[in-house]
Image (spheres, rainbow, N blue to C red):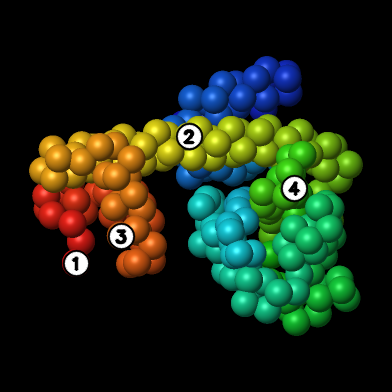
């Protein structure tokens, strides 16, 4: 996505442009990619990335502006210690002014310093239901992020939080509608082939789902594809 922002323009206009882009994004990956690209334009950072939380406490890294960001995230995903982990856990903004002197996570800081990163700013993506993920901003210079950068980063994180939450919700709704359509088609096949009513057809699908420990949607899809009940 081409942003081509004029950094001398009014900040409100640039955020309005970002909001429009986020609203037009088709999926979560496109949404967060717009965020990290905007961050490079609006903030004094060398790299940016977004890590999102998944079910079971897992993390995914859907957008980075440089492979070094994925390495920094991975260091914390493997070890569980660092500003990303703290930001996610405490729903807090964490600033590392200089990885060469910060003593909170010495092992992590040393490895990040070796990657050429001196300043780190992690801002949580939060909604009323909790933390969705973290926006990570990185600079090759020490003390790169001032108060103005923090203020812009918080505004950007709020935009990203709403956009990601909305996009995820829309995807979940679309998936649910698709699942209902598949189950309905599968029920129709059973009703026609075995002269069943709707309740009995649904009960057969549900039983196969439980017996095979598979989602009802997947059982219905297989029945539609093969015209036979799963073994």
Badge 4 is on which residue?
130
The image quadrant that residue 5 belongs to is top right
The Cα atoms of the two marked residues, 3 and 4, are separated by 36 Å
173 in relation to 49, above or below: above
Q: Nearer the viewer, residue 126 or 20?
A: 126
Mark 4 vs mark 1: in front: 1
The crowd level at tag 4 (other Cα within 10 Å; few <14, some 14-19, many 20+) is few
Give the label, 4 or 2, closer to the camera: 2
Of 182 and 104, which appears nearest the observer? 182
> Do tag 2 and tag 1 residues touch (Cβ < 8 Å)?
no
Which of the two discs, 3 and 2, sits closer to the camera? 3
Could you say whether the residue bearing mark 2 is in a helix, strand or loop?
helix
SS under mark 3: helix
* Residue named by callout 2: 173
Q: Which residue is mark 3?
A: 208
- Quadrant of image for the C terminus: bottom left
Q: Which residue is identified by label 1?
A: 231
Q: Along the polypeptide, which appears first: circle 4 or circle 1?
A: 4
| Label 3: few (<14), some (14–19) or many (≥20) C-alpha neighbours in 10 Å | some
Q: In the picture, residue 57 is in which quadrant? A: bottom right
> Which mark is first along the chain, 4 or 3?
4
Left or right position of 55 against 192: right
Tag 3 and tag 4, C-beta contact below 8 Å: no
Q: Secondary structure at mark 4?
A: strand
Above or below, 162 against 123 in this view is above
- Please tell me whether mark 1 sits on a helix, a strand or a loop: loop
Q: Residue at x 13, y 54 (%)?
A: 228
Q: Position of residue 7 (x, y in %)?
A: 67, 27
């Amino acid at each position: 996505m081409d942003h081509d922002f004029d950094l001398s323009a009014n900040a409100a206009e640039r955020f309005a442009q970002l909001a429009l882009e986020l609203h037009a994004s088709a999926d979560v990956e496109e949404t967060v990619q717009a965020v990290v690209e905007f961050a490079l334009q609006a903030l004094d950072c060398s790299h940016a990335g977004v890590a999102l939380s998944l079910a079971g406490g897992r993390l995914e890294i859907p957008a980075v502006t440089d492979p070094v960001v994925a390495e920094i995230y991975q260091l914390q995903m493997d070890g569980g210690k660092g500003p990303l982990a703290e930001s996610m856990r405490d729903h807090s903004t964490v600033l590392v002014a200089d990885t060469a002197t910060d003593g909170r996570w010495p092992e992590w800081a040393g490895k990040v310093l070796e990657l050429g990163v001196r300043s780190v700013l992690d801002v949580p993506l939060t909604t009323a239901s909790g933390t969705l993920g973290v926006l990570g901003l990185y600079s090759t210079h020490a003390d790169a992020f001032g108060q103005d950068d923090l203020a812009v980063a918080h505004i950007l994180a709020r935009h990203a939080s709403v956009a990601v939450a909305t996009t995820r919700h829309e995807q979940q709704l679309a998936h649910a509608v698709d699942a209902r359509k598949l189950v309905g088609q599968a029920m129709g096949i059973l009703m026609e082939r075995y002269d069943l009513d709707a309740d009995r057809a649904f009960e057969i699908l549900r039983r196969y789902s439980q017996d095979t420990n598979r989602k009802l949607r997947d059982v219905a899809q297989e029945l539609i594809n093969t015209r036979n009940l799963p073994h």
